[in-house]
Image (tube, coloured by chain):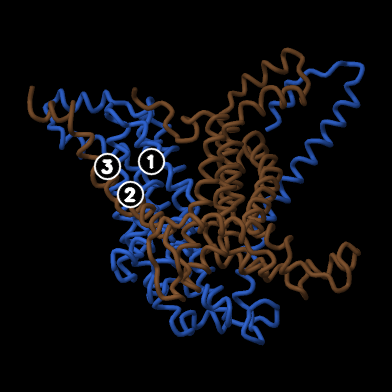
Chain colours: A brown, B blue
């Protein structure tokens, strides 16, 4: 057996993994360790001393002081995910089954928002929802909005911004799973005298579930950690946990609190991912289907 | 187009009503999809339109009058040009770094069976499921404790870090379902493993690698959250906008955004068009080379 062949059997894969995994270990895993260390320090930079003391009080304080922002984050992210699903599913369905020659153009329209910088997309919503803008004045004239009512700086504007910014993350996996459905399955359903509703509910919808799971996850995770929409389209009354983390970190240098909050957020996300993984199966989630085994 | 509906049998006695209901439902669904597309495109249109605005205050939020001033002098705002330059530089470097590291990792993960592959797959997935604010904050904790001054270098490190997982996932999906018999053929013909990789494997996975690179570039040039934590005094394009958003939003920002948009859009359309042409040409041959 040549050296290369022996390497291929044993060490080569590990050798190939060193650079990429090494980078992730040093700049992703190790920093998490440092953050854990940071989260158990007591004192703040304001008091001058930051010492490592296994101070778990940071966590209980973080929960009691910022439970409002935590709950709001999950509420806004949940709402945005739900709305994105309600908008995205019919659109993905139409593109996949009726797109015809327009399919590529429609898909392009779905990813077009990504061609514009995130922050500018959000500023654009500020323009659209402006107090003197077309949307607000129209809503006022039909009486949906009261005379002094506004959209900017409300829950509506923040959730609208979040929904918009992450909508393509919902649509693309939905489209991918719908497009993969074998049309013969649907025909079989109709041949068996299934009505449209039955075929949709018993064939199409179950077959598109992987897309629903992936889409909701891809939308929910960034949405719950977002602070840009709340900052630009809202006021401190709409602030989410991301706003707290970034201001504790970068504006007041309260590292222990910010680190504890980050861990709590990450832990909650992982719990959600694991629940989803149980429902959907890890392979669909990790994208490792069809790997050699 | 309506193949699925056409095959649905309708019971004769209710055929008329069913057909009407179906047509209404179809119409409603198409209308809804159309509105969703409008929702996706309106903010982009607003940006394009407002790049021609001549705002009367510091903020470009209310339409005043048509003007070409901003387009004539896109980098007229101090700092904007250099911020854009920094962003492009970081995006280019981090794309190269992350694409190489991620492609090698993906190759190892798909091609070989070894102990620990499942946990490694999961480990690579975790950064994708971690909120950006956490990635940024933890990296800053690390740099602070290690005594590393934040700046250009730390932004680059951070961008390579968050892009690796995206590259692995993208390249892996291309590698799965790869026909390995072509590699065996190359080896049977006396190619060394390195020659096989360079002349056979790499060209075949190139579309996946390119897609991953494009994705990495787009994510890097657009990143605000992680960069904001690790930038020190370096200012990238998104950081410039963030700073501007609180004090003044000159129309030039919308001009640059429109430019990026138009360049990306044309590149995209050109690629699709070329692919179509290649496919058409390939379909003339009796046996299309399907990989």
Please name the residue that numbered disc 2 is placed on: A24
The C terminus of chain B lies in which quarter of the figure? Answer: top left
Image mark 1: chain: B
Q: Which mark is residue B104?
A: 3
Q: Determine the CA span between mark 1 and mark 3.
A: 16 Å
Residue name at image x 80 percent, y 68 percent: A136
Of helix, strand and loop, which one carries label 1?
A: helix
On the image, the x and y values in percent for residue A26 come to: 29, 52
| Direction from residue B247 to residue B227 in the image, left or right | left
The vertical placement of B265 against B278, above or below, is: below
N-terminal of the two: label 1 or label 3? 3
Of helix, strand and loop, which one carries label 2?
A: helix
Image mark 3: chain: B
| Direction from residue B212 to residue A223 in the image, left or right | right
The N terminus of chain B lies in which quarter of the figure? Answer: top right
The vertical placement of B71 against B217, above or below, is: below
- The foreground one among A3 and A263 is A263
Q: Mark 1 and mark 3, same subunit?
A: yes
Image mark 2: chain: A
The vertical placement of A81 against A5, above or below, is: below
Mark 1: few/some/many CA within 10 Å (<14, 14-19, 20+): some
On the image, the x and y values in percent for residue B279 come to: 43, 38
Q: Determine the CA span between mark 2 and mark 3.
A: 14 Å
**In this orientation, does residue A205 appear?**
yes
Please name the residue that numbered disc 1 is placed on: B123
Q: Are marks 2 and 1 in contact (CB under 8 Å)?
A: yes
């Amino acid at each position: 057996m040549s050296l290369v062949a022996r390497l291929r059997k044993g060490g080569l894969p590990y050798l190939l993994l060193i650079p990429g995994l090494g980078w992730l270990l040093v700049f992703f895993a190790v920093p998490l360790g440092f953050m854990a260390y940071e989260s158990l320090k007591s004192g703040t930079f304001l008091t001058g001393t930051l010492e490592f003391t296994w101070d778990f009080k940071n966590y209980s304080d973080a929960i009691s002081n910022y439970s409002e922002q935590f709950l709001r984050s999950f509420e806004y992210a949940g709402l945005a995910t739900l709305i994105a699903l309600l908008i995205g599913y019919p659109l993905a369905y139409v593109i996949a089954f009726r797109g015809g020659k327009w399919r590529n153009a429609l898909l392009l329209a779905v990813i077009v928002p990504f061609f514009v910088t995130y922050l500018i997309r959000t500023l654009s919503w500020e323009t659209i929802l402006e107090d003197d803008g077309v949307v607000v004045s129209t809503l006022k004239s039909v009486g949906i909005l009261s005379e002094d009512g506004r959209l900017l700086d409300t829950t509506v504007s923040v959730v609208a911004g979040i929904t918009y910014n992450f909508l393509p993350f919902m649509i693309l996996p939905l489209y991918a799973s719908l497009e993969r459905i074998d049309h013969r399955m649907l025909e079989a359903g109709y041949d068996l005298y299934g009505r449209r509703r039955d075929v949709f509910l018993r064939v199409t919808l179950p077959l598109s579930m992987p897309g629903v799971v992936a889409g909701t996850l891809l939308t929910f995770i960034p949405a719950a950690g977002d602070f840009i929409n709340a900052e630009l389209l809202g006021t401190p009354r709409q602030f989410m946990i991301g706003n707290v983390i970034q201001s504790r970190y970068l504006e007041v240098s309260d590292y222990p609190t910010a680190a504890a909050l980050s861990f709590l957020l990450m832990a909650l996300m992982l719990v959600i991912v694991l629940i989803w993984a149980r429902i959907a199966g890890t392979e669909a989630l990790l994208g490792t289907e069809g790997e050699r085994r | 187009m309506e193949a699925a509906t056409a095959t649905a049998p309708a019971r004769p006695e209710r055929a008329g009503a069913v057909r009407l209901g179906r047509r209404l439902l179809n119409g409603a669904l198409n209308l809804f999809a159309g509105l969703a597309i409008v929702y996706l495109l309106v903010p982009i249109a607003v940006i394009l339109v407002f790049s021609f605005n001549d705002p009367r205050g510091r903020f470009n939020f209310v339409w005043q009058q048509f003007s070409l001033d901003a387009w004539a002098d896109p980098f007229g705002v101090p700092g904007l040009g250099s911020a854009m330059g920094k962003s492009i530089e970081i995006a280019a470097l981090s794309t190269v770094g992350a694409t190489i590291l991620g492609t090698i990792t993906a190759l190892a993960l798909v091609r070989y069976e070894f102990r620990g592959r499942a946990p490694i797959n999961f480990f690579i997935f975790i950064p994708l499921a971690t909120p950006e604010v956490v990635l940024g904050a933890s990296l800053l904790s690390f740099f602070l404790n290690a005594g590393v001054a934040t700046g250009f270098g730390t932004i680059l490190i951070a961008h390579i870090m968050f892009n690796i997982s995206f590259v692995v996932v993208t390249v892996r999906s291309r590698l799965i379902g790869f026909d390995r018999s072509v590699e065996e053929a190359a080896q049977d013909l006396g190619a060394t493993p390195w020659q096989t990789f360079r002349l056979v494997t790499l060209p075949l996975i190139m579309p996946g690698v390119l897609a991953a690179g494009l994705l990495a570039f787009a994510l890097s040039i657009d990143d605000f959250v992680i960069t904001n934590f690790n930038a020190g005094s370096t200012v990238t394009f998104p950081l410039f906008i963030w700073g501007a958003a609180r004090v003044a939003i000159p129309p030039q920002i919308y001009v640059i955004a429109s430019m990026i948009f138009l360049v990306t859009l044309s590149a995209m359309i050109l690629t699709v068009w070329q692919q179509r042409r290649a496919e058409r040409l390939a379909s003339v041959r009796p046996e299309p080379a399907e990989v």
